[in-house]
Image (cartoon, grey):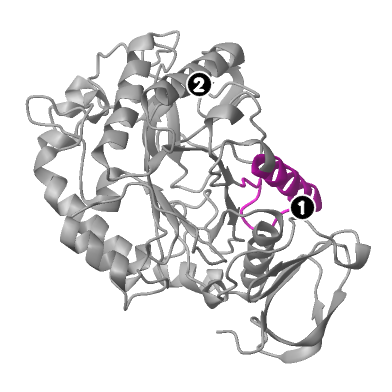
Amino acid sequence: MKRFGTEYLILLLITGVIIANGGDANRNYPSIFQAWNGIENRPDEDELHRLVRHDLAFAHPYTLLRISWNISEEQPYSGLATDLNPNQLPVARERKQELFSLNPNLLLLVEIRYRDAKYLSRQNEAHVENWWEVGFYPPDSPYWLKGSNGKPVIGWGEDTNGNGKIDENDTILHYLIDFTNPEAQDLIVNQAVALDKSNLFDGIMLDWWNEDYATSPTGVDDWSDTILTPEAESEARLSILRKIREQVEDDFLILVNANMRQIPKSAPEVNGTFMECYKQEHDRGYSLDQILQIEETLLWAEQHLREPRINCLEGWRVVTNYTGDLNTRIAERNSEENQQWMRMITTLSLTHSDGYVLFADDNAIPAADHLHNWYEFWDANLGQANQEKATQYQGIQGFFIREFENGWVVYNRSGTKQTVTFDVPVISINSSERQLHHQISDFDGEIFLKTGTD
């Protein structure tokens, strides 16, 4: 875990300054990020110390800094709020100082909802226990996207009964927002501007980012027809991006969830892509074709997106017990198979980017998405990279090596086991062996530290 420099910490405490944009000049690799939900296998650590293990995190502002959008009993809809709760600012500033004292490189991004959000009908609103438990917008708001029947359309849910589809027996989480509406766009932009001016957060994350097809299906399990055209959605997304860029500081970060797709139209305005790497079957890993697509998109993003770049690669684990409890989830993440996938995804990120990486649960399972274990593999201190990305070892196709200040990262998807040889003995993080020659299985990876490096 990285520590704040003593002199800099004293300066912060004396001046009371909160720096919104964390720097990464001293960021060590591997560099892990948190997507909404956090670590589950460190029960002896409190939530704050689990959070600062990561170098980037995105979530609701309250999750990060214990500050919410400025809502009240008179105006309880968070989608209409355009500033943060001023009464919570002292707590948020104190928490940020504490986070930065433990990890000065931590970047905090707030998710702004624009494609879907919580919806409650007037009838359901009347039965909420607390006034703040209402939907994102009022039930009759023009910002909800309506179907042919004039009713809001389901945008997302969880398959809680495990039947492979989302229906009335499952948990419906969100309904679609009409983000082509100029007034809805202005609310989205105003929230981004408020976050920028708060000096608490480094930027925002926008989910469901797509330049290839529409994301407004008429039914959550039927994408054969959409309410909005791909052209209308793309134009609206680009409009939102450009409006935000016009009103925020140049160093305000924008991360978008484009999965494994390239986003050339958005590239000038976007600092990073959240590569939430979807796979069809939760009980299997990734195919070679998927891995090749991940590599291609990651390298593209490293070259074409706006600087500073904050590309985030997330791989999903293999799930055996679909409805497993906490202990089952922790154990499955530590299986030999998942440990190998974790090493592969981590070393793919390290050899092909200067970004962030995460290995987490498959979104298909009923538990909260993106929960994960912290792996000792991630505790390696590689320092900064000093070799080009995607360098093949001795010209072997699919076998990559990258040197860092304190060691090397090797990633293998060549189709067969490979051997890497060093000039001096190095220590394998996975096996703890110190030797000249190390073997790497196919679809695996390893970190090697130079002798005398912690």
> Is residue 331 in view from this perspective?
yes
SS at badge 2 = helix
Quarter where residue 131 is shown: top left
Between 262 and 336, which is closer to the camera in this rendering?
262
Near mark 1 (Cα within 10 A), the count class, few <14, some 14-19 or many ≥20, is few
Q: CA gap, disc 2 to disc 1?
A: 31 Å
Residue type, mark 2 in image = Arg
Q: Label for residue 207?
A: none
Quarter where residue 210 is shown: top right
Could you say where residue 45 lies in the image, as x and y percent from the top left?
31, 75
SS at badge 1 = loop
Q: Give the residue at x 73% y 49%.
A: 295
Q: Label for residue 287?
A: 1
Between 294 and 120, which is closer to the camera in this rendering?
294
Q: Residue furthest right?
A: 395
Residue type, mark 1 in image = Ser
Is residue 277 placed above or below 197 in the rendered structure? Answer: below
Could you say where residue 52 lies in the image, as x and y percent from the top left?
37, 64
Between 255 and 47, which is closer to the camera in this rendering?
255
Q: Which residue is mark 2?
A: 237
Is residue 310 placed above or below 263 in the rendered structure? Answer: below
The quarter of the picture where the C terminus appears is bottom right
Quarter where residue 105 is shown: bottom left
N-terminal label among 2 and 1: 2
Could you say where residue 240 lies in the image, as x and y percent from the top left?
44, 20
For the image, the number of numbered tags is 2
Could you say where residue 153 lies in the image, as x and y percent from the top left?
41, 20
Find out whether residue 291 is within the magenta segment: yes
Residue span colored magenta: 277-302
Between 386 and 244, which is closer to the camera in this rendering?
386
Is residue 214 placed above or below 322 in the rendered structure? Answer: above
